[in-house]
Image (cartoon, rainbow, N blue to C red):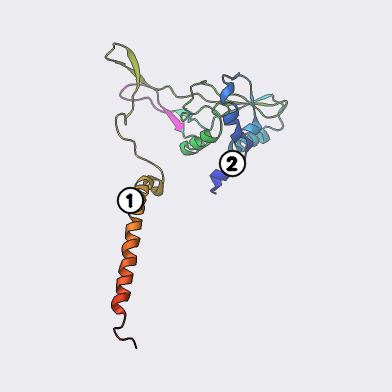
Amino acid sequence: MSTITRRLFSSSSITRSTAFENTLPLDLSSPVHAKHLPRVLQRRIAKKVFQTEGELQSNINIQNPFLPQRLGRRTDSEITGEPRYHWKKPSISNRRQKQLLQFYPPIDLPISTKSSSSITSQSRPVKWNKELTINWVGQLPQKRLEKQISPENEILPEIKSLYSGRKQMFKGHKNERNREQKLKDRQVRLDGMEKRIREWRQGRNDEKARNRPSLPF
């Protein structure tokens, strides 16, 4: 078992994904306990709490590790004049976010662009202990939508993307990418396995008969 998979299965929050399916909608303003979060988020919170240990605070703001962080401002665009900023990538990669969203309910995790759930646009606070509450800082980026008129004269939003209409490349491992074709080839070989075994046995018996001496001594 890989290190990432071991970390995912090492917490008791995996069972919450099925336990809360039938209890939605929940009170999203109520904090979720830190023990229900993945270990990677627990370590991040513990590090921030340790840094502010001497300060008496009831709420601590932590940057959402699932979202990019906007830093200082750059020079404005020379073409459009729009302001531009420096951006920092999310601390947790998109691939790891997808893995966490598979094993933990999205309502307990910070908001992410990889989450297919549209329950809320804000992250739930985290209850670290009786006195301390953690708030995730960060908002989802505003997607640029353009209006398109449908044949029924309905206005439908469309996500403007550079790769819209193109086939998305599979970014998994090579064995995962070739797995479907490998299973098909294996099934083709299994379908004719009995015939090949029968022909091989017949050929072996014929060869023994040819090599058998004609004299009895």
> Is residue 55 shown above or below 205?
above
Which of these two is toward me, 133 or 72? Answer: 133
Q: CA distance from mark 1 to mark 2?
A: 37 Å
The residue that label 1 is drawn on is 188
Of helix, strand and loop, which mostly describes the magenta segment? loop
Q: Nearer the viewer, mark 1 or mark 2?
A: 1
Answer with left or right where residue 176 lies relative to residue 215: right
| Residue lying at 30% horizontally and 74% vertically, measured from the top left | 207
Q: Earlier in the sequence, mark 1 or mark 2?
A: 2
Front residue of 210 and 107: 210
Measured as percent of width and height from the top left, residue 121 is found at 51, 21
| 126, above or below 205, in the image | above
Quadrant of res 106: top right
| Dot 1: element | helix
Where is residue 74 drawn, in percent x and y?
Answer: 42, 28
> Relative to residue 7, is residue 25 depicted above or below?
above
Q: Is residue 72 left or right of residue 40?
A: left
Q: Residue 114: image x %, image y %?
A: 46, 30
Q: Amino acid at mark 2?
A: Phe
Residue at the image position 30 percent from the left and 86 percent from the top: 215
Q: Residue at x 63, y 34 (%)?
A: 45
Characterize the local packing of mark 1: few (<14), some (14-19) or many (20 or more) Cα atoms within 10 angstroms. few
Task: Quadrant for residue 104, please give it.
Answer: top right
Provide residue 119's location: percent of width, then percent of height.
51, 21
Mark on residue 9? Answer: 2
Question: Viewer-proximal residue, 47 or 56?
Answer: 47
How many circles with numbers are drawn on the protein? 2
Q: Is residue 156 left or right of residue 8?
A: left
Query: Which amino acid lies under the numbered mark 1 shown in the image of this protein?
Result: Val
Quarter of the view holding residue 78: top left
Region rendered in magenta: 74-87
